[in-house]
Amino acid sequence: MKLVNPSFLKFSYVILGLSLSLQSSASRWGLAKQYTIPPLKDSHIVLGQTYQDELDPKSIKVLVWNLLKAERKNWTEDFMGLSEKKDILLLQEGYLNPVMESTFNQMHQFRFDMAVSFLYNKDANTPTGTVLGSKTTPVKTGILRTSDYEPFIKTPKAITYGVYEIAQSDKKLLALTIHGMNFTKDEALEKQVLDAIKVIDAHDGPVIFAGDFNTRNKARSIFLRNIMKAKNFKEVTYRNDKRMKFLVYPLDHTFVRGLLVRDSKVITDVKSSDHKALDMEFALDHN
């Protein structure tokens, strides 16, 4: 029997979008009323506390993962296991329901910064968005939210970023986690990435820019790689590249500047999200 490619699962979202497009305008706005977009000034949530002030320049361990809102069985155990020895967590589809909030609160060495995309009214106004976790106290944090909205549900996407001291260095690390615009025109994703580039351009030091970019077609993939190359970033490759794909296009990426890649792999045996987790280790590039 021929097995279905796992990436085919993403077609369910396309089918949903097509069915919604047949609904009336009033119905679309009715769907959008299920969600609330809070003011940007009220959209940065902080949980937890860290106990170290600097990253180790010889070893910066990073996890990149779309959490699928902690919907699947064994998510807490998987997430805590994957995160235990990491320094920085670049997460998408954070969803501060009791399960995820409790999990974050159990991780006593971590601070979590969430950029809220929107609230689910039907689930006690639970916030969702990108999350930046770290064992090092950031010297600066910030959030970005798109001015463009996903169609039908009329919700934005978000980016969370933080700046961290590095031991024995006058340089600081900037880390950004993105959940890319999806069912919009490609230009909306391009604009979102360019907003992040403005933050990157203002930073003098090493950078990690990673997440679920929703590069679901050739044009998006080429744009992303070209703009990151123009900004002197290197795309991390994986020794077992089993990343989540839509057709032939990987959705999750990691780009670095001013860092050396010591190791990079895809975690293939964790099933509590539809996306595979990316496990990496970097060192400061002194050149």
Image (tube, helix red, strand yellow):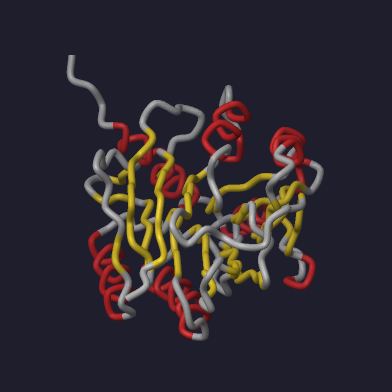
User: Is 61 left or right of 259, judged from the image as shown?
Assistant: right
**Quadrant of the drawing holding the N terminus:** top left
User: Is 153 left or right of 126, judged from the image as shown?
Assistant: left
Residue at the front extreme, as displayed: 168
Q: Is residue 16 above or below residue 225?
A: above
Residue 39 falls in image quadrant? bottom right
Q: Is residue 149 above or below residue 135?
A: below
Which percent across, then down, holds residue 99? 72, 33
**Quadrant of the drawing holding the C terminus:** bottom left
Q: Between residues 212 and 2, which one lies in front from this camera angle? A: 212
- The residue under the point 45% across, 27% down is 271
Q: Between residues 135 and 200, which one lies in front from this camera angle? A: 135
- The residue under the point 52% across, 65% down is 175
Which percent across, then down, holds residue 56? 52, 58
User: Is 121 left or right of 19, judged from the image as shown?
Assistant: right
Q: How many marks?
A: 0
Residue 282 visible in the current orientation: yes
Which percent across, then down, holds residue 193? 44, 72
User: Is 108 left or right of 279, judged from the image as shown?
Assistant: right
Q: Between residues 112 and 30, which one lies in front from this camera angle? A: 112
Residue 257 visible in the current orientation: no
Residue 5 falls in image quadrant? top left
Q: Between residues 196 and 12, which one lies in front from this camera angle? A: 196
- The residue under the point 26% across, 74% down is 226
- The residue under the point 39% across, 26% down is 269
